[in-house]
Image (cartoon, rainbow, N blue to C red):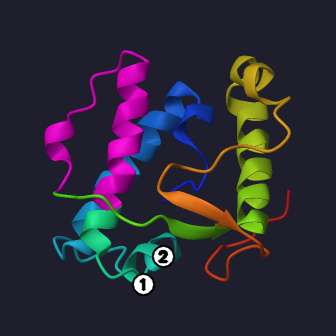
Amino acid sequence: MRLWSLHPKYLDPKGLVALWREALLAQKVLAGLTRGYRHHPQLIRFQQSREPGAYVAAYLMAVQAEATRRGYGFDAGKIGPTRILEPLAVTAGQIAYEWGHLLAKLEVRSPAWLAGVGEIGYPEPHPLFRVVDGGIAEWEVVTAR
């Protein structure tokens, strides 16, 4: 499961679909509707918020908005209730780590998409997040590239 801190506009079609599915799974996990994934590190920042369900719904809304912008038919009816929320913090180090991770994935999976986004110096975060100083998040499972 990967719940990107990056704006979903940077994801290739396969990545956007995977994000949608994984975030829907996260919504079920946070609602207590599954037995698995309850301790997945990608859920920690949502679990630490005051309203995990509302935050994951807001996360999904931005993914669905990007899908709609691209002409995809992601069903907004699958998103749980949300409201206006204060953005969650994400560190600049986390954004940088995820950016490198995404670029490496795109190099293998979607070189044409990489050509369109690879020259961006510093990507925007997902709309749910605001960037703060700091390194890679403690919950991140760092892999060698």
Decide if residue 53 is on the left or right side of residue 81: right
Kindly identify the amino acid type of the residue bearing the numbered disc 2.
Answer: Arg
- Callouts 2 and 1 close, C-beta under 8 Å: yes
Q: Nearer the viewer, residue 11 or 122?
A: 122
User: Where 129 sits versus 111, above or below?
Assistant: below
Image height check: is 115 above or below 33? above
| Apparent side of residue 23 relative to residue 92 in the rendered image (left or right) | left
Q: Could you say where residue 65 lies in the image, as x and y percent from the top left? A: 37, 33
* Identity of the residue drawn at 37% across and 73% down: 37
For the magenta stretch, what is the residue range?
Answer: 56-80
Give yes or no for residue 59 being in the magenta stretch.
Answer: yes
Q: Secondary structure at mark 1?
A: loop
Pointer 2: residues within 10 angstroms few (<14), some, or many (20+)?
Answer: some
Secondary structure mostly seen in the magenta stretch: helix
Instruction: Identify the residue under disc 1.
Output: 48
Examine the image and state in which quarter residue 35 appears.
bottom left
Q: Tag 2's secondary structure?
A: helix
Amino acid residing under circle 1: Gln
Q: Is residue 97 above or below residue 36?
A: above
Rounded to the nearest angstrom, the CA distance separating label 2 from label 1 is: 5 Å
Residue 3: mark: none
Tell me where residue 116 appears, x and y as whole percent. Answer: 74, 20
The location of residue 98, given as percent across then percent down, is: 71, 55
The image shows residue 111, relative to residue 4, as above or below, that is above
Q: Residue at x 70, y 45 (%)?
A: 102
**Circle 1 crowding by C-alpha within 10 Å: few under 14, some 14–19, many from 20:** few
Q: Taking the image as drawn, is residue 2 in sight?
A: no
The numbered mark at residue 45 is 2
In depth, the one of 50 and 109 nearer the eye is: 50
Quarter holding the C terminus?
bottom right
Residue 54 position by quadrant:
bottom left
